[in-house]
């Protein structure tokens, strides 16, 4: 089961998501202008989905999400980690 930890580095805020098992999922969701974020894959790999699109993301990939774009993450490797940093 996915585990989430809130993070704060000075003015930067966000969350760290750990996915212990293949198939662990961060369900489809959206963010508004105030809580929009970038995603950094720090370990492992993911499938990211949205309305009519799909990406395979690996360690080192960064995605700058536009506000209001629905997205979901599914772990492809055990021990995958995703770090989201809020832009607002």
Image: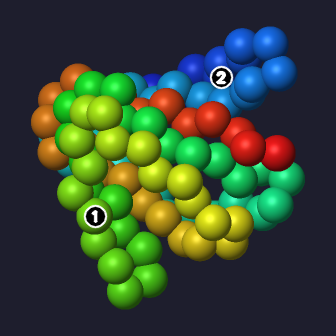
Quadrant position of residue 56: bottom left
- The label shown at residue 77 is none
Residue 65 in the image, given as x and y percentages of width and height: 57, 59
Quadrant where the N terminus lies?
top left
**Counting residues from the N terminus, which is met first, the one under dot 2 or under dot 1?**
2
Q: Residue at x 34, y 60 (%)?
A: 48
SS class, disc 1: strand
Quadrant where the C terminus lies?
top right
Q: Pointer 2: residues within 10 angstroms few (<14), some, or many (20+)?
A: few
Of all residues shown, which one is farthest toward the bottom? 52
- The label shown at residue 6 is 2
Identify whether 69 is placed above or below 51: above
Identify whether 19 is placed above or below 64: above
Identify whether 43 is placed above or below 35: above
Residue 81 in the image, given as x and y percentages of width and height: 35, 28
Q: Which residue is mark 1?
A: 55
């Amino acid at each position: 089961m996915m585990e989430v930890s809130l993070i704060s580095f000075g003015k930067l805020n966000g969350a760290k998501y750990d996915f212990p098992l293949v198939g662990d999922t961060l369900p489809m969701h959206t963010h508004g202008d105030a809580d929009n974020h970038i995603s950094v894959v720090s370990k492992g790999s993911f499938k990211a989905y949205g309305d009519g699109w799909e990406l395979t993301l690996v360690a080192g990939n960064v995605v700058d999400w536009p506000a209001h774009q629905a997205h979901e993450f599914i772990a492809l490797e055990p021990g995958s980690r995703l770090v989201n940093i809020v832009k607002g």
